[in-house]
């Protein structure tokens, strides 16, 4: 005899009833949290950016004040009568055109040479097997801790023996050593993040070391290339100590020496000094803006393989 099913038999269990509080905190709340997190992150980023941009903006504003005036005691977002002729005046006071040409020559040779030697050094260091790799790393870190003043006298003697003491080549010489251990280590850490199987596959395909470096390693290191180019440009463009130590002829001076001469001519003429400093800073800002696509680009291994 068949019996009628008890209530609830043969039916799926009734889902629990969710309260209104759970509905309000459900999936609809997640976009709000993401939006709030995005807004907070954006505000923090803008605040940090302002900390770095405001001094540059203040420098540019002071450079447009009338010559001889001290810096403003209150916040001045823009001068009432901008004196754009201050930038012409710095070329009249000091032969900055010649100094600019020397600085451009130094960075035009030093930056590509630094990029080549630093990347080759980092790639070679990443391919060396242990224990020699660890030993070379220890040497690189040790050299990184050596203060620059410790090699001034030795470099002076080397330049004197080579006959390069009063030429701009005395400023380019560090580029032959990769610009310093830090830039070599940056490339080493970048190349070490690439799986070793990719290099092994390239060797099995018949690629030599130069082909692997040029066609595989460097395309994967584009953000590091941008960083090294930026650091090398700032290093050689703003170099003040080496020209003071190794250059004696005024026709070989660079822009940092020219700004120092402006200060010696009139140390209280703030608009003129800030005009020289702004003129030196503009190329750095333009280069940083130009390299932004490389800093923010996606150069993952998968993307590189998809592009062939």
Image: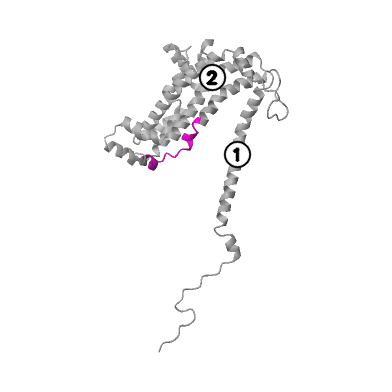
Q: Name the residue located 32 percent from the left edge and 30 percent from the top edge.
A: 210
Q: Main secondary structure of the magenta part?
A: helix
Query: Marks 1 and 2, Cα distance to the nearest angstrom?
Result: 34 Å
Q: Badge 1, how many Cα within 10 Å: few under 14, some, many 20+?
A: few
Q: Mark 2 highlights which residue? A: 241
**From the viewer's perspective, is 116 left or right of 97?**
left
User: Residue 46 shows which numbered tag?
Assistant: 1
Q: Quadrant of the C terminus?
A: top left
Instruction: Please state the horizontal and vertical placement of residue 134, each as a whole percent of the image.
Output: 39, 35
The magenta stretch spans residue 3: no
Quadrant (top left/top right/bottom left/bottom right) for the N terminus: bottom left
Q: Residues within 10 Å of mark 2 (few under 14, many from 20)?
A: some
* Residue 142 shows up from this direction: no
The tag on residue 306 is none
**Which callout, 1 or 2, points at the residue further toward the start of the chain?**
1
Residue 95 seen in this snapshot: yes
Residue 294 on the magenta span: yes
Q: Which residues are magenta?
A: 290-304
């Amino acid at each position: 005899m068949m019996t009628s099913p008890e209530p609830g038999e043969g039916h799926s269990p009734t889902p629990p009833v969710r309260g209104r509080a759970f509905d309000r905190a459900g999936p609809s709340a997640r976009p709000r949290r993401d939006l709030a997190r995005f807004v907070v992150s954006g505000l923090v980023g803008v605040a940090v950016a302002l900390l770095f941009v405001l001094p540059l903006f203040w420098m540019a504003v002071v450079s447009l004040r009338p010559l001889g005036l001290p810096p403003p005691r209150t916040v001045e977002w823009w001068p009432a009568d901008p004196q754009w002729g201050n930038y012409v005046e710095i070329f009249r006071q000091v032969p900055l055109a010649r100094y600019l040409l020397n600085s451009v020559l130094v960075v035009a040779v030093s930056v590509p040479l630094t990029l080549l030697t630093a990347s080759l050094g980092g790639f070679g260091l990443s391919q060396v097997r242990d224990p020699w790799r660890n030993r070379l790393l220890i040497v690189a870190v040790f050299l990184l801790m050596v203060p620059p003043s410790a090699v001034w006298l030795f470099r002076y003697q080397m330049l004197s023996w080579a006959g390069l003491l009063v030429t701009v080549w005395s400023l380019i010489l560090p580029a032959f050593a990769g610009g310093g251990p830090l830039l070599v280590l940056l490339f080493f850490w970048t190349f070490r993040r690439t799986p070793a199987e990719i290099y092994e596959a390239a060797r099995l395909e018949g690629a030599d070391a130069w082909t692997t470096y040029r066609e595989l390693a460097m395309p994967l290191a584009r953000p590091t290339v941008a960083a090294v180019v930026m650091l090398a440009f700032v290093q050689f463009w703003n170099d003040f100590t080496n020209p003071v130590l190794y250059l004696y002829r005024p026709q070989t001076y660079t822009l940092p020496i020219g700004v120092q001469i402006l200060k010696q001519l009139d140390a209280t003429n703030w608009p003129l000094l800030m005009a020289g400093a702004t003129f030196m800073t503009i190329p750095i800002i333009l280069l940083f803006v130009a390299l932004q696509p490389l800093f923010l680009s996606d150069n993952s291994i998968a993307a590189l393989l998809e592009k062939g």
